[in-house]
Image (cartoon, rainbow, N blue to C red):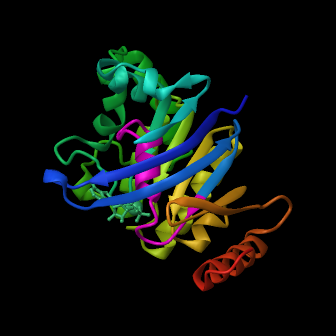
Amino acid sequence: MSLLEARNIKKVYKTRFGGTSVEALNNVSFTVEKGEYVAIMGESGSGKTTLLNIIAALDKATDGSVILDGMDLSKVKDRDIAKFRRDNLGYVFQEFNLLDTFSLEDNIYLPLVLAGRKPAEMQERLKKIAEPLGIANILKKYPYEVSGGQKQRAAVARALITDPKVILADEPTGALDSKSSDELLALFKQVNQMGQTILMVTHSTKAASNASRVLFIKDGAIFHQIYKADASDRQMYQKISDTLTLLAQGGDK
Ligand SMILES: Nc1ncnc2c1ncn2[C@@H]1O[C@H](COP(=O)(O)OP(=O)(O)O)[C@@H](O)[C@H]1O
Ligand SMILES: [Mg+2]
């Protein structure tokens, strides 16, 4: 059984008062195995964020289902959704989404605080990840006192601290300069090598070339996928570029 399965996901956004509707996702199906690092690529407006939000149970599909570790998300009761998300998923956003009035440490602790964990356990968990994430010496700082790259590493720590089944990342390098992007991608790779399953949406070819598999989404459906297998990041970059060129030409694979 796959760790994550998206089955025939459809999403139609209806404007209020019965106006026009937008079909953001048409028929998306794919699976992610435990320990995989999967990137989803597609142009702006192709439905990437919509898809990730549905998988994160932040939004509801119009049709289709998401199965995480054997659990059908649509069967989780509304009042249990926040807890389900906290217990199973880590989310990394393009804009970091840290609380400005909390230190980095308190931001990272937040999901555990909400889950009612004891301070000793929280400290123990943070100790394990702060060093590898390179944030051990800035934990007492506030978001406005650190760089974008450091903020994003704190956001990754916040996603990792609950030991989630999968990390979902939406354009995690989108707001970073190229050096910080490279650092974040190296970090994701390291975290994945430690066994963490990652699903990342991005329109960056460079970011996607780090993943072990890339899915291409176009007009709300998966158009193609490529496996990295033994290819280097460079070779993967080339394979992705070639696929994107085909996609842009509207051709078949
Ligand atoms: N809340 C919303 N209401 C109406 N339309 C939306 C909403 N969110 C996204 N859309 C539309 O759905 C499509 C996919 O958007 P999105 O998932 O944000 O794409 P991406 O993340 O790939 O840029 C776009 O046409 C967008 O305008
Ligand atoms: Mg988006």
Q: Name the image quarter holding residue 6.
A: top right
Residue 138 shows in the view: yes
Q: Name the image quarter holding residue 236.
A: bottom right
Q: Position of residue 95 (x, y in %)?
A: 32, 58
**What stretch of residues is rendered in magenta?**
40-61
Q: Quadrant of the C terminus?
A: bottom right
In this rendering, is residue 101 above or below 93?
above
Describe residue 161's horizontal placement relative to residue 4 as left or right. Answer: left
Q: Residue furthest front?
A: 18
Q: Residue furthest left?
A: 17
Q: Residue at x 63, y 39 (%)?
A: 196
Q: Position of residue 57 (x, y in %)?
A: 40, 35
User: Is 253 covered by the magenta stretch?
Assistant: no
**Nearer the observer, 252 or 92:** 252
Q: Quadrant of the N terminus?
A: top right
Describe residue 214's horizontal placement relative to residue 57 as left or right. Answer: right
